[in-house]
Amino acid sequence: MIGFYLKKNFCDGWDHILFLIVPNILTTLYAALAFFLLSVVFNLESPFALLLSCLAFIVFMALGMVLVMASAENAAAIADFQMPTLGAYFKQMPKVFFDAVRYGALLGTLMVVAFIGVPVYFSAGGILGFALCATLIFFEAIFFLTLQWFIPLKTILGRGFVQTVKKCFVLFFDNAGFSVFVFFFNLFLLALSLMIFCLVPGPAGVVLSGINALRLRLYKYDWLDVHPENKTAKLRKKIPWDALLKEDRDNLGPRGFKSFFMPWSDGKN
């Protein structure tokens, strides 16, 4: 399943690269502006500079997430072998605004807590200091591994904010290994983006990656609903992925190296 996920994600991104580049350019420009304003606030000659910087960072994260989350609708269309449109991206901004702002503020708050808490506990030293530092890092890791599923779940299932957050925890604890893999794969995509001026894969590519990952993973739950006798922990690991992914494999088709530059070479238009 992992191999097909990686292949499909790459093919989807390559075939619809324009729909990654446009959101990424807007997000990068916004991030550059936010970084400049944040540096101005941080360097203020005020005893409240750090507090104001933390609050500004959370606000910038909240608003920036609107640009990121707006690309999810197109990502879902791409993952479903449908045709995205640039218009859909801009139309999604007001629709996702409130959920995106809350999600971005939540992530921003977690980052601020880690930024302040980890150095403070670590510098305190002693067994208690190191224990508190390790505990904070552990819970921060769990939260980030869990909340990576928010945008995919919100886009595919369309539930409310609180329900989606709860579902993130359910999905993570039932698929911890896969969640860790997707998290580090997305970190790799972001690191790769820095080498390509954040044009691709970028944040939009990470959104596509998450939606592809969730979309394929949901086949597991569709199969378990049909086969309730296989819901024991041991049998849940024996998911017939080859059969479940057959339709997607057929839709994606064989993709040789030449097909990425000459799609007609594999019989595709």
Image (cartoon, grey):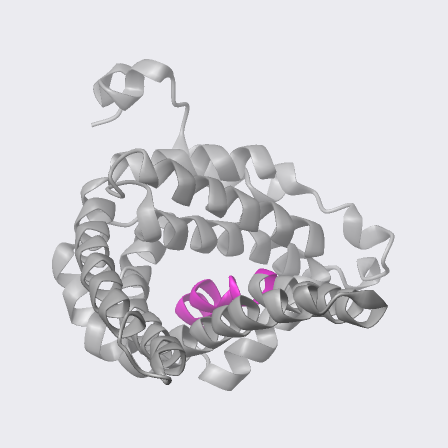
Q: Is residue 127 magenta?
A: no
In the rendered image, residue 209, in percent from the top left (x then y), is placed at 43, 48
Q: Main secondary structure of the magenta part?
A: helix
In the image, is residue 222 above or below residue 258?
Answer: below
**Residue found farthest to the left:** 87
The answer to whether residue 208 is visible is yes
In the rendered image, residue 207, in percent from the top left (x then y), is placed at 38, 55
The residue depicted at 81 percent of the width and 66 percent of the height is 126
The residue depicted at 78 percent of the width and 48 percent of the height is 237
Q: Nearer the viewer, residue 115 or 109?
A: 115
The residue depicted at 58 percent of the width and 70 percent of the height is 168
The residue depicted at 18 percent of the width and 62 percent of the height is 33
Q: Residue 67 appears in which quarter of the rendering? A: bottom left
In the rendered image, residue 114, in percent from the top left (x then y), is placed at 56, 68
Q: Nearer the viewer, residue 219 or 57?
A: 57
In the image, is residue 4 above or below residue 108?
Answer: above
The answer to whether residue 251 is visible is no
Quarter of the image where the C terminus is located: top left
- Say left or right for 147 vs 56: right
Quarter of the image where the N terminus is located: top right
- Say left or right for 128 vs 150: right
- Magenta highlight range: 145-157
In the rendered image, residue 129, in percent from the top left (x then y), is placed at 76, 70
Q: Is residue 146 magenta?
A: yes
